[in-house]
Image (spheres, rainbow, N blue to C red):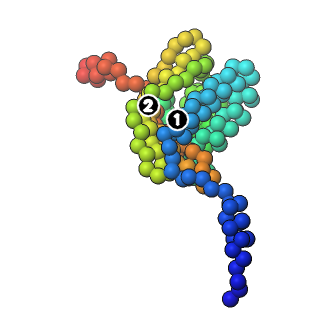
Amino acid sequence: MTDIDESKVEAVAQDAPTFNNNITVDEILAAQKAWGVALMKISKAWREGGIEAARPVAEKALDDSYGYALGPVLFKPTLASGAQTFRLTRNAALAYFIGHSDEYPGDAGFALRKWEGYRNENAAFFIEGAVGTVMGKVFLKDTDGNETVLDKTWQYRKDDKGTVRIVVHHSSLVYTPEYEKDVAG
């Protein structure tokens, strides 16, 4: 058996990167803000340079925010339906955000709308270890001053480098009582 030089072991341990794997409310808030900023950047890139300008911005937003490298992301977009309701792959999410996809011909590009403002009103958080879930409303304002309100549920998970990633994203338009009148007949 060989003697171990403990000073070298400690030096190696001190050089190893460390992070706290427990996710915090502040990290979730920062991730939500980053998502909103990215959506605004995609929209602005589209307005200023068309799809050629919007595509790389959208790809970066997906890579920075979502956990597609960790496995499928459980993404139910606001304006998706039928057989293409759920977007489990990066390419499917990209099609939703910027359209222009032969595989997803019904996608107009949610991020290509004239968005210029974004805010959250979170209702509640559930956090356990490296996973955190938040539910609430997202308010999107367009360049004409119109506001769209969405109900969102996001779940975040830290990857092996400590980066917070979206792994569940469920979005829907806000329910209105008029719907009940239409259904009831």
What residue is at 67 percent from the left and 56 percent from the top? 17
Is residue 139 rendered to the left or right of residue 7? left
Q: Callout 1: helix, strand or loop? A: helix
What residue is at 52 percent from the left and 24 percent from the top? 119
* Residue sitting nearer the eye, 138 or 175: 138
Which quarter of the rendered picture does the C terminus lie within? Answer: top left
Is residue 86 rendered to the left or right of residue 13? left
Res 102 → quadrant = top right
Q: Is residue 79 depicted above or below 134 in this figure? A: above
Name of the residue lying farthest toward the top = 144
Q: Is residue 77 depicted above or below 22 in this figure? A: above
Mark sitting on residue 29 = 1
Q: Position of residue 19 (x, y in %)?
A: 60, 53
Q: Amino acid at mark 2?
A: Asn
The answer for how far apart the CA atoms under marks 1 and 2 are is: 9 Å
Is residue 24 rendered to the left or right of residue 98? left
Q: Is residue 79 depicted above or below 8 in this figure? A: above
Query: Which of the two labelled residues, at mark 1 and mark 2, occupies the earlier sequence position?
Result: 1
What residue is at 44 percent from the left and 31 percent from the top? 122
Residue labelled with disc 2: 122
Q: Callout 2: helix, strand or loop? A: strand
Q: Amino acid at mark 1?
A: Leu
